[in-house]
Image (cartoon, grey):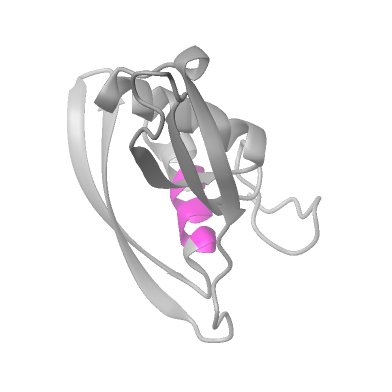
Amino acid sequence: AQRGKRGTGKMTVAGIMRQYQVVGRRAPTEENPNPEAFRMILFAPNETIVRSKFWYYLHQFHKMKKTTGEILDIVEIQEKNSRVVKNYGIWLRYQSRSGTHNMYREFRDVKLTGAVSQLYDEMAGRHR
């Protein structure tokens, strides 16, 4: 599923997957002026979706909502050496019509984000 809209790279249904590091915390209060910060590394096509994913997972893990917290930093992580083809193995869990399944898939690509884009393409096409 190569469409090549935004330069070179593979497109998924959502777009080219990028890797982001997001740092956020609960909003400071008088009782807790310096709350604990949380860091996540997430894959998403753009910053808007990565913000949404960050709050989704933070709410599940720490019962914190967007209204009670703040994002301190969002950085896109670039791979240092993208000239060598590597094998990436990805463990994932997904929901299907018949239940929850664990899966291990291997992909060859020059970047981790390319392998994750291939994973999203394959999951969208083969596994419903």
Q: Residue at x 48, y 38 (%)?
A: 125
Q: Residue at x 38, y 40 (%)?
A: 37
Looking at this view, name the residue that lies furthest to the front.
Answer: 30
Q: Please state which of residues 51 and 17 is positioned toward the viewer in this rendering.
A: 51
Q: Please state which of residues 72 and 35 is positioned toward the viewer in this rendering.
A: 35
Q: Quadrant of residue 31?
A: top left
Q: Please state which of residues 67 and 94 is positioned toward the viewer in this rendering.
A: 67
Q: Position of residue 58 (x, y in %)?
A: 36, 28
Queried whether the magenta region covers residue 122, the answer comes back as no
Q: Position of residue 25 (x, y in %)?
A: 42, 33
Q: Residue at x 49, y 45 (%)?
A: 22
Q: Position of residue 16 (x, y in %)?
A: 64, 50
In the rendered view, would you say 53 is above or below 18?
above
Residue 29 in view of the camera: yes
Quarter of the rendering occupied by the C terminus = top left
Q: Position of residue 97 (x, y in %)?
A: 28, 18
Queried whether the magenta region covers residue 115, the answer comes back as yes
- Dominant SS of magenta comes to helix
Q: Please state which of residues 69 and 33 is positioned toward the viewer in this rendering.
A: 33
Q: Quadrant of residue 32?
A: top left
In the rendered view, would you say 81 is above or below 39?
below
> Which span is picked out in magenta?
113-121
Residue 96 in view of the camera: no
Looking at this view, name the residue that lies furthest to the top.
Answer: 67
In the rendered view, would you say 63 is above or below 61?
above
